[in-house]
Image (tube, rainbow, N blue to C red):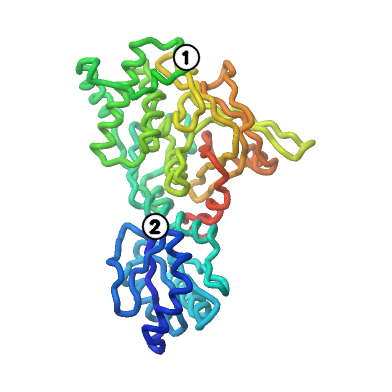
Amino acid sequence: MTLFQYAVVASILHDERQKRALLGRFESTLAKAGGEPQTLGSDTLRPRDDTLPLFIFVLTGGTEAEAMELIVQEKMLQREEPVVLLAHPSQNSLPAAFEILAKLRQDGGKGTILQADTMGIFDEKTLGDTVAVSQSMRALRASRIGVVGRPSDWLIASHHDPKIVRGAWGPELRDIPFEELSDIIKEVRAKPQEDINLPGLREKAEFYTEADEADMRKSMEILCGLQTLVVRYELTALTLRCFDLVLQDRSTGCLALSALADEGIDAGCEGDIPSIIGLHWMRTLTGQTGWMANPSRITIQQEDGGAEALIAHCTAPCSILSRYGLRSHFESGLGVAIAGIIPAGDVTLVRIGGKNLERVWFSPARVIASPRQEGLCRTQAVLRMPLERAQELLTDPLGNHLVMVRGDWTGRISAYLRLWKPI
């Protein structure tokens, strides 16, 4: 599968046979990482695919002007697209890459240099992370996030202007009045019951308590309404002012948001802008479906240098759960919520914040338990995490919710922030 293309720049002092022989040392590593050559000299090997990141392979020295012409031609500076320069330890490749990157930064651009070793091999993890970061940036800039209703009134630090979101992270925010969703739900409600289905969620649940068939019906109608908005506005993600459903419809969006996330449409609660950006960022960067949750308890354990956190929410994508039951929504006692069990293992926690969304907190963690305590939102996870990260949360929080994804992705997140940090 092609994940990126690379254009080769080489000095006119080298003939085509020399260039091809030199390039041949690196092609297998680049192909393994998903790379496809785009040009070599005057020969076009593959047409340019604008949906893929374009890296520049600095094959020899004397190529600085040619590389900058390519950067201008591809409008990388105009699109604020980071430039990845591939270099190697011979033929003055690295010094040419230094000059190109220096000029690029003088012009306000961003970029990095990846250097192959003497055997012609690029570090697999570094190259893979760089490809993932490049793809994530492009995907975010092509994303459209629906904000269905305003952020909940209590999210006083999590409501950001669309221009700030666009400038800092790339996605377009599309404000959608809550009334539009309500009107669609009314239309769906008029259809025969057999025309509406909440795929498999009831059948796979290990128990079903408190909620009744009318609650399930409402959850199906809400899902249909949100799916209609996804198609209507071509959304890649959405966040919902879900408590208006509690007040106006005596229902909740918990089941619908879970189903959307498992369909590949990141879906957040309460209109929380930083959290839906975090959920969508993690999907584009790692391929993982994320979970948005409240940090309900943080316990510092000085004796062993660690900390424990309990996070919880009434919705979660079923794909990240080992099993689940269906209950009512915790705060209201209405609707249908997911009481899931999250399997033990490594996870990563993320929170975006700051006035201009310029700050990112993240931490490795490990799920050690997934209880079902009363007095908390229905899906719960107890996490072990580094002491200093927990202390940061307590002393300098960025907002209410955290985003969790399966696996340790801290290295890839660090690569993203180190190379192309927002703002």
Q: Can the viewer see residue 79 in this picture? A: yes
Side of 360 where 8 appears, left or right? left
| Position of residue 268 measured from the top left corner of the image (x, y, whole percent) | 42, 34
Report which quarter residue 260 is drawn in. top left
The residue type indicated by label 2 comes to Leu
Q: CA distance from mark 2 to mark 1?
A: 42 Å
Report which quarter residue 248 is drawn in. top left
Residue denoted by label 1 = 207
Q: Quick check: 118 above or below 407? A: below
Residue denoted by label 2 = 3
Q: Quick check: 76 above or below 179? A: below
Q: Earlier in the sequence, mark 2 or mark 1?
A: 2
Location of the N terminus by quadrant is bottom left
| Position of residue 43 measured from the top left corner of the image (x, y, whole percent) | 29, 77
Near mark 1 (Cα within 10 A), the count class, few <14, some 14-19 or many ≥20, is few
Q: Residue at x 39, y 81 (%)?
A: 65
Q: Residue at x 33, y 24 (%)?
A: 199
Q: Secondary structure at mark 2?
A: loop
Residue nearer the viewer, 7 or 112: 7
The residue type indicated by label 1 comes to Phe
Q: Residue at x 27, y 66 (%)?
A: 47
